[in-house]
Each structure stands twice: as structure tokens, then as C-alpha cells.
Image: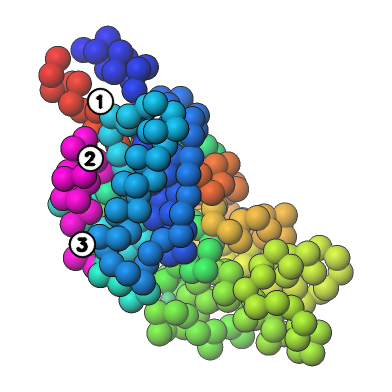
Amino acid sequence: MSAAVAASGESTVVAGVDIGGTSTLVVFVDERGSVIAERGGETPAHVSGEAMVQLAVDLIAELTAETGMTPAAVGIGAAGVVDPVARRIVAASTSFVGWAGYSVGAHLDRALGVPNSLVNDVNAFLLGEVAFGAARGLDNAAGITLGTGVGGAIYLDGALWEGPEGAAGELGHSPSYVVPGHGEEPCTCGQSAHLESIASGRSIERRYRARAGQIAADLPAGDGAALATRARTGDGAAAHVFAEAGLMLGQAAVTLAATLDLGHLVVGGGVSGAWDLIEPGVRTYLAEHPPVSGRTLSVVRAERGSHAVALGAASSARALLTEDALIAS
Ligand SMILES: [Zn+2]
């Protein structure tokens, strides 16, 4: 049994796809998680669900032509609530035209005819870090992505735990009360005082502008890297908003530890590029509010960066091959 699995694993390449709001990335991955080749494109999010999946199919064909390798399976990591069994998008942001309800798996079956999987992008991010990154080899871990918004995912006893409604780990919309006076901070969900209200890229920028006043006027909109540079070069207001994001993240980590006995949290997303500014707040919170279990709580930056979602999707696709091999043997 294990010999058949190993043989199929050693000789096959799988494709992992990250369909994001602005860009799509396809990687060909070997069994060790090495990216053999990759190609990106602009997500046609304003066109249709079919166009988005077809872009992935086209990019895979281009990589096959380039490398001479045909992937044995394909995994897609995509924004939105997904049904991984039906391989269909259940709900998505309105910025994705025709995405909610789209049968990604049926399209891939027709176009590629190989085993394929569909995973929510934040879940895929965590799978990628478990398979090949900062949570490598762990059976239990959580992931948080600090991007435009805040996403979360939970991996328990060696498998994703998505919850009966697929909403497990949505820590971005968990209430939080660490930061004094932030009770009115608006969240994208329409409520307020959520982790996302403080720790998303958009929130950090909004809070900086509110705090810094006139000196914020020449900060380019949406330029998180420029804001981080300000924080590193003596802008106290900028440093403050990153530090508060860290405090909130620390609170989320302690909540996870208290609820699920999870001792390992991997933090990714674009804002994690400012990890040096966020981590001190996390440490402060953990020092003041250690888990009552006495366990050590590890909160670390993701290792696979912009590849993590595609790698996790590839990992979920490779699991399909392993299952096939087990059934055949
Ligand atoms: Zn919210």
C-alpha cells in the first residue's frame, strides 16, 4: 500500500491555483513542495466565474507547454465560502461577478479531466503552511491572514476543521476589546470592534489617518509598505497602530488556545510583511494573558509568503491522488 503511494508521489507534479481578487497564480509543485514553475495573470473577477476558472486552465496549459509536464491533479484555492465536496462556490463578495454558485469542479472536470479540489483561500493558506511552511508537520494549528480583510482557518487532528456552516476560524469577525476606546471602530461586516476593525491592512491605514492628522495627508492610499516604513523611521502614530494590531492578534491567539487548545498560530497575508512592527504587541499580550493551561503559545509569521495559498491547494489535490492510490491498492 505505502509503496504504491510513494511511487505515485515521486513521479507526479500537481498544480496549485490561487484565485485572488486581483491576481491569479498557478504553480506546479513536486511532492516536496518545491515550486517547479509558476505563472500569474489578472483575475477576470468582473467578467464571470467561468472566465476565472478558464484563466486557471489556460495558465496550466501554458505551464505544461513550458515544462513538458502535465499535472496529475489540480487544486484551487479561492476567495469565498466554498463547498469542498460539491467543488462549488457557495457565497462570495459582490466584487466577484458570477462567482457565487459557480461549479468550479464541473468546469475542471470538463477542461482537464484530472482529479481536482476546491478549498477556501484562507484554508488553503493554512494547508500550505502545514504541508510546507511554518506549521510543517503539526497536527494542530490555526492560521490568520492579515490582508485587506482578516481571514482565519483551523487545522485539527490532521485535517481542516471548517465547521458545519463552513465558517470555523472566522476570527476576523470575533469581538475584541483590548484596545481602549476602539469600540466604535467599524468593521466591513457592518458591525464594529472586531479583529478586522483593528488588524486588517485597510483598518491599520484608516486608524493611522485618524490618529496622525495632517502628516498622514501625503501617504499614498493603500500603500501598507509605505506606512510600515513610516513606523520604522520614527512616526509614532504609525508604530502605534501596528502595535495595537499586534495586541489584538495576541488576544485572538489566546482565545484559540482557550477554546481549542491550539498552541500554534501562523500569521500570513500582506500585513505580515510588517511582522517586526506587529510581533511586539503580540508578545506583550501573551505575556500579560498567558493561556491558563500553561502551554506555550507560538505565534509565528508564515513562511511561504505569496505561494502559500497555491501550495495548500496543491497539497489538497495531491491528497486526492493518495486516496486514489489507497483505494486501488
Ligand atoms: Zn466584522
Q: Residues within 10 Å of mark 3 (few under 14, many from 20)?
A: some
Q: Is residue 198 left or right of residue 72?
A: right
Q: Are marks 3 and 2 in contact (CB under 8 Å)?
A: no
Residue found at x 61% / y 85%: 181
For the residue pair 54 and 169, the one nearer the viewer reads as 54
Q: Which residue is mark 3?
A: 102
For the residue pair 124 and 104, the one nearer the viewer reads as 104
Badge 2 marks a residue whose secondary structure is loop
Label disc, if present, on residue 112 of the rendered structure: 2
Badge 1 marks a residue whose secondary structure is helix
Residue 307 % position (x, y): 50, 44
Quarter containing the N terminus: top left
Badge 3 marks a residue whose secondary structure is loop
Quarter containing the C terminus: top left
Three-letter residue code for mark 2 = Leu
Three-letter residue code for mark 1 = Thr
Q: Residues within 10 Å of mark 2 (few under 14, many from 20)?
A: some
Q: Is mark 3 within 8 Å of ligand 1?
A: no
Residues rendered magenta in the picture: 100-117
